[in-house]
Amino acid sequence: MKISKKAQYAMRAVLAIARARRTHPVQIGDLSKLEQIPVKFLEQILLTLKNGGLLRSKRGAGGGYFLDKAACDIPLLTILELIDGPFEPLGNDAHESPTGLGQCFDQLRELVNDHLIKFSIQDLIEMERSEDILAFEI
């Protein structure tokens, strides 16, 4: 499974917005520089995420993007499906065939989806924080 560059950018953008203060919108230009995502590409991604109900925007001076849901309510699977569509290792044909191959890849799809739905944006932020903490032992 290869995740598209667009989906990678989408996940990074949502993470960056989640890290920002909830009362402070993140502007596209700032997000583009921070995450090194081309502005035109980022605009398309943010619009898709907004239409998917993950983000909301504020227009005008001081405008930008906010999360429309709590970070703990945004699983990675939702972002990936909004951008790349559902994960189908063999395409839709696998569901029509009761063969062992079809069954094997159906199980793979379920495993991947189950894994990605367990990790929210908040989980990833907490993972980053735990990596920043230094442990000293005496």
Image: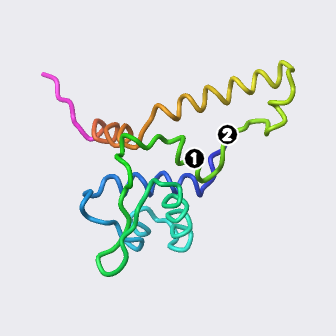
Q: Residue 102 colored magenta?
A: no
Is the magenta region chiefly helix, strand or loop?
loop
Secondary structure type for disc 2? loop
Q: Are marks 2 and 1 in contact (CB under 8 Å)?
A: yes
Image mark for residue 13? none
Identified at 67% across, 39% down, the residue is 87
Three-letter code, disc 1: Leu
Q: Residue 137 colored magenta?
A: yes
Give percent across and percent down for residue 131.
Answer: 31, 37
**Relative to the observer, which residue lies in front, 132 or 121?**
121
Identified at 53% across, 60% down, the residue is 51
Disc 1: which residue? 80
| First of labels 2, 1 by sequence position | 1
In this rendering, the answer to whether 97 lies above or below 134 is above
Q: Residue 95 falls in which quadrant of the image?
A: top right
Secondary structure type for disc 1? helix
Callout 1 environment at 10 Å: few (<14), some (14 to 19), or many (20+)?
A: many
Disc 2: which residue? 87
**Relative to the observer, which residue lies in front, 54 or 113?**
54
Give percent across and percent down for residue 108.
Answer: 68, 26
In this rendering, the answer to whether 97 lies above or below 44 is above
Give percent across and percent down for residue 90.
Answer: 79, 36
Where does the magenta region start and end?
132-138
Identified at 60% across, 53% down, the residue is 83
